[in-house]
Image: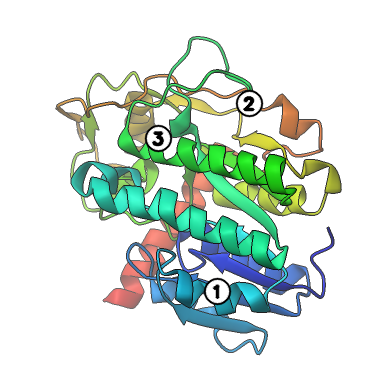
Amino acid sequence: MVLKGKKILITGGAGFIGSHLAEKILWTLQPASVLVFDNFCASRHTNIEHLLADDRFELVTGDIRDYDVLEPLMERCEIVFHLAASKLVVSAQRPRLDLETNIIGVFNILQLARKYNRHLLYTSTGSVLGSSDIPMDEEYSCNPTTLYGISKLTAEKYCKFFHREYGLPVTILRYFHVFGPRQDYSGGAGVVSIFLSRVLDNQPTVVYGSGEQVRCFTFVEDAVDATLMVMEKEETVGELYNVASDKRVPVKQLARIIIEKYGRPGMQIEYGPARPGENLKPIPDTRKIEKLGWRAKISFEQGLEKTRQWIIELRKKQA
């Protein structure tokens, strides 16, 4: 599937990953148009403000739970990147919203994609897997330990059903611990941005639980490259891929790295209670997507510095 000259819809396109995806498509792939659909529940207008002057770019505010609002947008597009989702932290605080967004919202997208025969990419998460001492490939038996993981796995199964039963051209990606510029550092997710923000404020990093939980940090530009690559290859239709770098870092070690690089002398790590359902070793096997030609290009250290610089620049603008 060649994206050049196509009309593209990105749900959640004003969010962290979605805004990088919209930017990359506009600036490198010469689409006919890019329509970003977002309810700004967990997104920022600043993420896409630099794209608004482009005549090929359009922003529509709305919610994927609203079928009637989605339908005319789906009718206008040719390719759909579905990134809109309820976050992990939302699932514990507002479980019904998590269900409605991550299951009903996805079902709306699938129904409309089938109706108008649209090519769809669905972005899932490593939270569907659980933990294992060995890397887990795409066929590994899933054991989600959070409501978020359950809802995202359910959506994966709906995607597979629509492909199998109706021939819908859909591809599934599972992101693992994506980080980088535009990731919110004020909430409960995005540990790299949160730790950097606190250290820049001369505040201690807070590690929940033992800190031994491993994260597979993937820089956002690499995640976007994987997303575009699978949509441009016909053989990926109906397939599922894990997307993660080979950088495996325990959260406690991450805190130490950031403190040593950017913190003041004597800064210490603080510890809080373990979070319910948190996976200790959600480590994927990524050989399947690597066989297609994808590998992470941005080193963890480069990504860390890029993220730090973004936080500094954002705060200058806000000041």
Give how far across and how far down residue 5 sits, in percent: 81, 75
Residue 85 in view: no
Amino acid of disc 2: Glu
Give how far across and how far down residue 269 sits, in percent.
Answer: 21, 30
Q: Amino acid at mark 1?
A: Glu
Instruction: Using the rendered view, name the quadrant where residue 300 is placed.
Output: top right
**Mark 2 falls on what kind of element?**
loop
Q: Which residue matches tag 1?
A: 71
Residue at figure coordinates x 48%, y 80% from the top left: 60
Image point (43%, 48%), residue name: 103
Rendered position, 100 above or below 75 = above
Residue at image point 49% right, 54% down: 106
Q: Amino acid at mark 3?
A: Gly
- The residue that disc 3 covers is 149
Asked if disc 3 and disc 2 are in contact, CB closer than 8 Å, the reply is no
Which dot, 2 or 1, sits closer to the camera?
A: 1
Instruction: Give residue 213's position: percent from left, percent from top.
Output: 36, 22
Q: Earlier in the sequence, mark 2 or mark 1?
A: 1
- Residue labelled with disc 2: 138
Q: Quadrant of the C terminus?
A: bottom left
- Per the rendering, the mark at residue 279 is none
Rounded to the nearest whole Å, what is the CA distance between mark 2 and mark 1? 32 Å
